[in-house]
Structures are given as structure tokens and as C-alpha cells.
Image (cartoon, coloured by chain):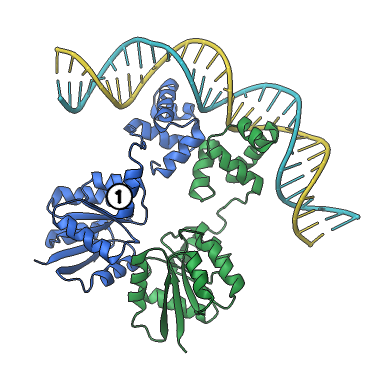
Chain colours: A blue, B green, C cyan, D yellow
Amino acid sequence: MTTRIFIVDDHYMIIEGIRSLLQNAKGLEWMGHAMNATSCMAFLQTHQPHIILLDINLPDISGIELSKEIKTKYPKIGIIGLSSYNQQSYINKIMDNGASGYVLKNATKEELLDAIETVMDGEKYLSEEAALIVKKNVGSKIPIITRREKEVLSLISEGLTNNQIATKLFISITTVDTHRKNLLAKFEAKNTATLIRMATHLEFI
Amino acid sequence: MTTRIFIVDDHYMIIEGIRSLLQNAKGLEWMGHAMNATSCMAFLQTHQPHIILLDINLPDISGIELSKEIKTKYPKIGIIGLSSYNQQSYINKIMDNGASGYVLKNATKEELLDAIETVMDGEKYLSEEAALIVKKNVGSKIPIITRREKEVLSLISEGLTNNQIATKLFISITTVDTHRKNLLAKFEAKNTATLIRMATHLEFI
DNA sequence: AAGAAAATCCTGTTTTTAGGGGATTGTAGG
DNA sequence: CCTACAATCCCCTAAAAACAGGATTTTCTT
């Protein structure tokens, strides 16, 4: 059976690179590419790939969101996340949103083929480096924050004081203060500076 | 005359992509690739490309640093910066450090060939999108901070208080406070939260 | 050598955050 | 129905940061 491959990435060179890598591979059929989420969804209305290689950083909506959307509408399609970053947060996020694999953009041809094969067999695939990261960071905490906390966090990062946030959200300053305290606790940050630094690096903001 | 091309990028897929794009181009000779700064410098001791396509994000030292190093030792080699990000700060940094061009990784074959040709002619090349960014951001302020200010900024982001920073740097707390004030003024930030957010996004930290 | 820029230090006041305790309401899931 | 959690609110104290004005001494550049 031929495995039909489709790729979603906004980097022309990556698309070319993967096409070049997969060109002569046996049992694979290159269906083409989309450079954003919208045209990907449009493509899927009329075509049915077995595997989608999906970049995490897309121009319109994030690959994470797109992954969820694809899986909801087309549960049979296997999704392999693609990214330059081997960050725990990325890997977790996309794997939690329907992806069956994660491959770094510096992967070799062999790794890529291995990933495709593994996912076609119905198993999960993590590239060596990604697996290492996940293993190393077992137990490392990525805080789970609530909607309201995220809202407050965002306003803090924009330079608003508790007082201003309270006015903006029509809540008491003491409530804002509580949210702030909880954020500091969840991120295990000593003060606002560390909080913002951590939140930025973990892509919360 | 044949233009000899060498590429430095740690992403296998990008290397393949560019090779695939340039494969059938006339007048170009593909010399190979390096995946980090060290092996790039080693290669240059025995080979002389006309153009180096240089990724900004390398595993060992940054492409910016490498660009400077290459230009110092081999001033004749034309350097074209390569990156996924069309951020003013990146473009400026690499162009200020010896690069003659800047191309985004979602560039088309035509753009890439155009860039190579332009740089070979001794001119500077900015990809359309990059040029747009630079144009749009003329006058937008990227603060210039001093060594000491950068040091203090970094410690602030790590969660140290003025007091702790003073102890660490063997200076008075009032001095630290002054540096902090100057940082806030230079970044036009209202408070630490905005300062850290802006500094992070502008890659100061 | 002169001037500019950087780094250092000072005295105040006011605002904001951090840390310690709480408590109440509503709502979603088992 | 009950429990957990989110979201809301309160008091108090101490610490830290922000704001406003300075001044002196290095260090670099021209």
C-alpha cells in the first residue's frame, strides 16, 4: 500500500527539503503542501492523506490548534508535529492535541521515514532528541493556569498595576492580588520579573 | 563564471531544501554544508566559496558572531543571512556584522537566486518581506543599553531584587536603582513586567 | 586635554508588590 | 449530592519598586 503524505509548513525551503528527502522513498506518495491552516483544511475536504507533517509555527493559527481541528474532523489521519524547537512545552502541547509523532527539523531522512512508518503502524513516534528532552524533563513543571489567571498574567505583562487590572476587569484589587499570588506560586517565581520571563519562555504570553 | 555556494545551517531539511532549489540553477556550484560554526570555519581553511548562506540560529555560536568572524578572515566571501524570523533586530544585527543579504526561509527559488546574484554583484540584498519590515520600523526604537545595564537587566530577569543585585555586583543599592531607572526609561517601560517582556522579545535576555 | 558617556552614589516620598493569614459563592464532574 | 476548583472578596505588614530630584568619579573618544 502507498502511504499518502501531505505537508503543512510556511517555509518554502522546508517543504522542498522534505520533498527532496522523500522523493525516492518507496511506498510514499507526495500529495503536495499547504502553507497555512486555511488552505490545509480546504485541501482535506477533497483529499485524504494518511499522514500530515505539520509545522507547529504557522502564520494563521498555530499547528497545535490545527492538529486538534484535523483530528476532530478526520480522526484517521496520522499527524506528525514538525518544529525547530525541541522544547518540552511544544512536544507536550502537540502530542496532547492529536499528534502521533514529533520530529525535529534537523532530523535525517531515516528518522523521518521511521516516524512515518511508526505512525502508520498506529504507534506514537518521538524523535530521539525529543524523547530525550521528555525523559529528562519528567516532573519538570509546566504550570496549569486558569482562564482568569492567564488574563491577569497578560495584563501584568503589558505593564498594568493591580489597580489598573482591577478597573479593567471590573473586579476588586484584592482579587487581582490573589490571582497574582497564585501565578507566582504556580510558576514558582519570586517576583514579577521572573514570572514574566518564565511565562514568556514557556509561551504563555 | 561559476558561483560557489556553501551553506551553514543545523537543520537537515533546510539544507536539503536549498540544495533541491539550487540543483538545476545555472552557474552555481554546490560545495556542501556545515551544521555548526566550528566545522564551517574548518571548511573555509581549505575551500573558498563565493557565497555563504548562513543561518542565524546555530547550535554553537550565533550566526551573527560567525558572520563577523568570517568577514574578518575572509572579507571577499559574500554572506547571506538566513532565518525564519523577519524581525528587525535580527536583520539589523547580521547586516551590521558583515552580511550582504538577508533571506527568509520561506523565500522562493527566485528570491534566493536573486539574492545570490545581487550579492555577487557586490550589492546588498534584502528579501521583500525583510525590506518591508525594515522600512516599516524606521524610527522604531531598539534601545541601546550599556554593559552594566545589560548585566543588571539580566539579574533582574533572574528574580534578584535591587538589594541582591547590589551585593552580587559589589555596588550600592542606589546605583542598581539608577541603572534600573535608566533601563525603564530606555525601554519606555512603565514597570519591571513590561521591561522584561520587551527585553525578552527584543532578545536582550 | 576636553568633552561625552558611563558608572557610581545620595536623600527623599509614594506607590506597588509580596507574604501571611483568611472567607464566600458558583459551577462542573464524579 | 458532594467535592474540588475557580473566581471572588477581605485585612494586615513588610519589602520592594517607581518617581523626583540631585552629585561625583571613571572611562572612553575625539
- Where in the figure is residue B16, as x and y percent of width and height? 34, 71
Q: Which residue corresponds to the image point at 27% horizontal and 70% vertical from the top-left? A: A21
- Chain of the residue on which disc 1 is drawn: A
Q: Is residue A124 above or below residue B62?
A: above
Quadrant of residue B138 within the rendered picture: bottom right
- Where in the figure is residue B122, as x and y percent of width and height? 55, 79
Specify whether residue A56 is in view: no
Q: Which residue corresponds to the image point at 47% horizontal and 58% vertical from the top-left? A: B87
Specify whether residue A154 is in view: yes
Q: Which residue corresponds to the image point at 36% horizontal and 67% vertical from the top-left? A: B14
Is residue A8 rendered to the left or right of residue A183? left
Mark 1 is surrounded, within 10 Å at the Cα level, by few (under 14), some (14 to 19) or many (20 or more) other residues, namely some
Residue to which mark 1 is pinned: A131
- Where in the figure is residue B25, as x and y percent of width and height? 36, 83
Quadrant of residue B189 within the rendered picture: top right
Is residue B65 rendered to the left or right of residue A62? right
- Where in the figure is residue A53, as x and y percent of width and height? 24, 59
Depth check: A129 or B197 in front? A129
Specify the amino acid type for callout 1: Ala
Is residue B13 rendered to the left or right of residue B201? left
Q: Is residue B176 above or below residue C5?
A: above
Depth check: A83 or A127 in front? A127
Image quarter hosting the C terminus of chain A: top left
